Each structure stands twice: as C-alpha cells, then as structure tokens.
Amino acid sequence: MRTNPLTTVRNLGILAHVDAGKTTVTERILYLTGTTHKRGEVHDGTTVTDFDPQERDRGITIFAAAVSCAWAGHRINLIDTPGHVDFADEVERSLRVLDGAVAVFDAVAGVEPQSESVWRQADRHGVPRIAFVNKMDRAGADLDTAVASIRERLHPVPLVVQLPIGTEDGFTGVVDLPRMRALVWADGADTAEEGPVPGTLREEAARRRRLLEEAVAERHPGALEEFCDRETLTAATLTGALRDLTRTGDGVVVLCGSAYRNRGVEPLLDAVVAYLPSPLDVPPVRGTHDGAERERPADPAAPMAALAFKVNATPTGRLTYLRVYSGTIGKGDTVWDAGTRRTERIGRILRVRADRHDPLERAVAGDIVAVVGLKTARAGSTLCAPGAPLLLEPPGVAEPVVHVAVEARRSTETDRLAAALARLTEEDPSLAVRTDPETAQTVLSGMGELHLEVAVERVRREYGLEVTVGRPGVAYRETVGEGVTGFVHRHVKQDGGSGQFAHIVLDVEPWEQDGDGAGGGFVFRSTVVGGRVPQEYVRAVEAGCRDALAEGPLGGHPVTGLRVTLTDGQTHVKDSSDTAFRTAGRFGLRDALRASGMILLEPVVEVTVTVPEDGVGGVLGDLAARRGRVTGSDPRGGAVVVTATVPLAELFGYATRLRSRTQGRGTFTARPTGYAPAPAAVVR
C-alpha cells in the first residue's frame, strides 16, 4: 500500500521569549539536516534566518523567516518567529498557517513573559506543541524547575521524556526515557553516541520513566489498557500515546538540551517527526462562500485553496508567502483572490530558505512556499481555484498602541516617503499610517518603540531617505464612565427640494467584555416597537453611531466600551431616508457622549525587570515614579525579578534609565495587558 506523501510533511514554528535561543535552535536544525554546511551564530551575525541587517546589528529576530529542510525522510517547513513583544503580530500570522510548534524555554529563567504570550497565541490557534528546555549548560540550569514553571504558568500537562546527564557546564547528554538509552555528545561532536544508561542514573531514570508511564496511562485509553495488563508500557505504545496526546493538546512532550553546544537537537528533530502532526492529521481547512461554510481537505487533487500570510518586497520582486491547504498550484497558473474578487497569475514558485530560494514547478497541499507575480495579494488574502471560490479567515491584526510623527527632511522627498511607508504597511499589517488632521503631519503607528525604530530605520536604509522623527506618543482611548438615558436628537434639514428628517432617542451605557477593564468595543441594539423606526433606518442609525466612535469628546481619541440602545424615534413620510438617519446617529451619539461622564484610557503593560539584589530599591522607586504598580518580586539566582503594571507612556526611555541605575546589569521586558483609566480622567 502506497503511503500518502503528506504524512512526511511537518509545518512548524519555533516560539519563545527573546534570547531563549530560538534562532540558535533553528541554525542547529539547518546544520544537522545538511541544509547549511556551517553553524551560524547570532553573536557573529552569521545566522541564516536572521538575515536582515537590522536583525544582525541588534542580535534579535525581527521578521518571521521560513526555511525548509529534510530529516529522516520528512520535509520540515520551519518558521523562526520573533521573540520580542513588539513583533507579536509576526508570530500571529505565522501561527495561523502552522500545524505544530516547538516552544523553547531558558533552563534558568523558565517561562518568561513573552514565552507566556506566544503560548497563549498558540492556544488560540489550537497548535500542538512540544517543549524544548534550552541552555542546560548554563549556571543555575535546572530542568525540574523549568518544567514546574511551565506547569504553573502555562497549565499544560508536561510529559518529560528525557533526563539530563550532567549539570550546568558538565551537561553532556540525555537519557531517552521511552527507549531507556543514553545519548552523549562529545566536545565538538555533531552527533550523539548511543549507549546504556549510566549506572549512577539507572534508578532515577527508572523512577522517571514510571512517572511518565503513569501520566500517559491516565490520559490515553490504549496506554491505560496495556499498563493495566502488563504494569508497564512498551516503547512503541508509549511513543504512540505521546503522539496522540500531543496532537490533541492533552499533553506536551518536554525535551532538553543546549543548542549552542549542539546537544539535544537530534532528539528534538526526532520528536518533531514522531509527535507533531502532518497536514493530514489536522482538521480540513474551513472557509466560506456565499455565506455557506465549506471544507477543503489536504489533498493535492482537491480544488486549490491557499492563504497568504506574509508579503516581502525584495530587489528581485515582490514575494508572497503562501500556505497551500488543498489542491495544487503550478507555475503560470491563474488564481482567484477571494477578498479582492480578481484574478492573479503565479509567475514563479520558490522553496524558501530565508533569503535564498530554490525554484519549483508546482506546490501541493501542505506546502509552505513563496510565489512571485502577485500584484495585489496582501497578508491574509485567500487564493483559490477560479472555479471553486473559498474565503479563508485571515490572521487577526493587533491594534497599534504607539505612534510617531515622520517627515522627510527634504520637501522634494515627501512623495518618496509616502511610497516607502505604504510599502512597509503592505508588508507589516500591524503598522498603520495616517495624516493628522490638525498638524497635517504623517503619523506612523505600531506595537512599540522598537517596532517603530525598526520601521524608520528600514526607510533610511532601504529607500535612502533622510527622515525626522517626533517623540513617541501612545494611542489613547475614550470610554463611557456614566451614561445617559432618553437622549433625544432631531435632525432636520430643508434647503429646497426633498429635505432630511430623522428623530431618534438613545440610551448610552458602559459595556465591558472579558473583563479587560478597557471596554469591549461597541454594541448596538434597538428596542423600538410598533415600527416607529423601520428596520432599514435602524441599520442606518447603527452605521452613524459607528461613524461617531472615531473621535471622542475628551481629545478626539477613538471611543470604545459602550452599548447604545435605540429606544424610540419618528419618521417623515417624504423627508426620512437612510442618509438622514445615519446623520442623526452620528451627531446624536456625538452629543450624547458629550453629555456622558467620559473616561480617558491609556495603554498599560506588564513589565518584568531582572535586577541584581543591590539595585532593587532604586528600581522599585523608579517604577513608582512612573506610576507603576508592583505586583510581584521573586528572588532568582542572585537576582530579583520584579513584575509591575506600568502605563506605556511612562516607559519611553526606560531601558537607558534602567541601565544607568543598575550599572548595565538590569534588563526588562514588557507585554501589553490592555487599557486602564488615566489619572483624573473622569470628565463631565
């Protein structure tokens, strides 16, 4: 019986907090699979996936990079994702098209703020994961402590399948618990030597394998049956059960190693092949057409459906990265963009290895490839067979929270700057560009200071433009603290010919969703009875109210977190229309907000500061001066980890201040947590 080739495909991402070692893990995978012939190093700027000049200068991953390699007869399409919170949108777009992931954790720090964030992102997308505890050779590294932090902070069921051999600098290998064998890496060796479990570890290895068997048997019916019959599990049964638990999300396999020293990466690759799903193991992709939900199987013979998740402008042309969910795409094919409802032609198809590409004649279901020739497709666009339209759900786009004013130094280069910014927003949907109506300045918005710094630096380097950048500002919001009821607004306009008439009565009240404290957006409902306002006019009132949300009464910021109820109204036989009621909705809600008790909201972030013990006092005082609220303090290996909630506006320039207060020994990370009322913000 012939095996379906899709069973040998793995589409996975590498997820982690910044500096946990994602890119080093990726580099070792490429080296061990023969994709590269030299081990790239982040500190040397020689990595394959961090190929952008800014990534090499800063020593961090900024852009998700796709690579393809082969291991044990399997094709692995791998995406190295950013670890910095400012680039979480890159992670979101990658997770949308992946079937599995490897979450990398620091063996000393355990679960860090951004590793928690990316884990939650993977939860939302239902992506199966295995965990790799990296940097086992560091001072203070402890597998059990790292696993405990995974269990306590992320709440999965960790299934530890390895026991480290040696500690810290003496870490030399692992005991493979399912097969009860030792894998040891000699200094400078690329591959492990297999042997029996060392005598000093046999008792501990047997105890841990027993714990693993019990944990698996509790959650897997097939394993439980064998465990009850034999009081143990064979390696084949244990491996099969681990695979099932991983793919259903009922357990997370945990491995360990030191990617920098090339120890533990081969078992990680084996685990990717053994436990993570192929395109056939995940549910068929679901989309819509003409309001009806449709499914497309992962079958090269089915009608084609693919999702664009990344766009990149290169010197040789515009690259659009696709995940092909079903069907086959051939070079020169015509495809249908379901969003723009127009056809596009595939010029070339490329197998991707970061910034290098190999031409392909076709791509089939399960592939992640780049294509050349698409003119209008954006990240989130659905491409499908013209004769079988389907619209897939696009990745979510985060709302920008920081903005800067950007101007070209030479007035003659204003148009070039506009074109450059348009190109950046095309490649990165989490960037936004607008013109300030009061100052006529161009405003660039993004997810954080670093995000905007990188974008502006790209304008300078790639487009050769000299730009002036204003001081960063934050994206405030307004919400209703105390609403109004029975607010009457009458719109009457008579200037010859048919006039406009609309009479509406509104109730405005606060509305929160998910308890995030920032409000949950906007809800509109109608309680009008007796046909006093026809349904088509009700929809026009809702549209007008949504128009009014763009600018609030406190400072012209977007309004969120309110519920508007249309309770009554009147119409005129001749002069009432959709336009009249939409205008009434817009100006009526605007006036109602002025009459309400409004609250100004500011974005807040959770800050995690790691500082030497002798610098804690100064850091706590500085956080208090920045209106920070300390939520925790945890001693960790001669340092103290302080967590606090701080308004984003108070964090500009904090990195420099922290370095000066701690003689360069302090570090911090921040992740958005929502919005909170700004001080003295209730205004009548």
Image (cartoon, rainbow, N blue to C red):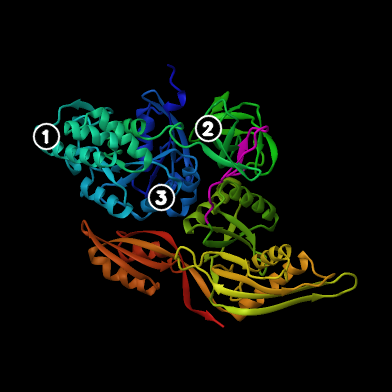
- Quadrant for residue 34, please give it: top left
Residue 475 showing in the rendered view: yes
Q: Is residue 82 above or below residue 489?
A: above
Q: How far apart are the two marked residues, 1 and 2, measured between alpha carbons?
A: 47 Å
Q: Is residue 98 magenta?
A: no
Q: How far apart are the two marked residues, 3 and 2, measured between alpha carbons?
A: 28 Å
Q: How far apart are the two marked residues, 3 and 1, measured between alpha carbons?
A: 36 Å
**Type of the residue with mark 1:** Arg
Q: Which residues are magenta?
A: 378-398
The kind of secondary structure element at disc 2 is: loop
The chief SS type of the magenta part is loop
**Residue pointed to by mark 1:** 202
**Apparent side of residue 443 relative to residue 94 in the rendered image (left or right):** right
Residue 483 rendering spot, x and y as whole percentages? 56, 78
Q: Nearer the viewer, residue 332 or 661?
A: 332
**Type of the residue with mark 2:** Pro
Q: Which numbered tag is attached to residue 297?
A: 2
- Contact between marks 3 and 2 (CB within 8 A): the answer is no
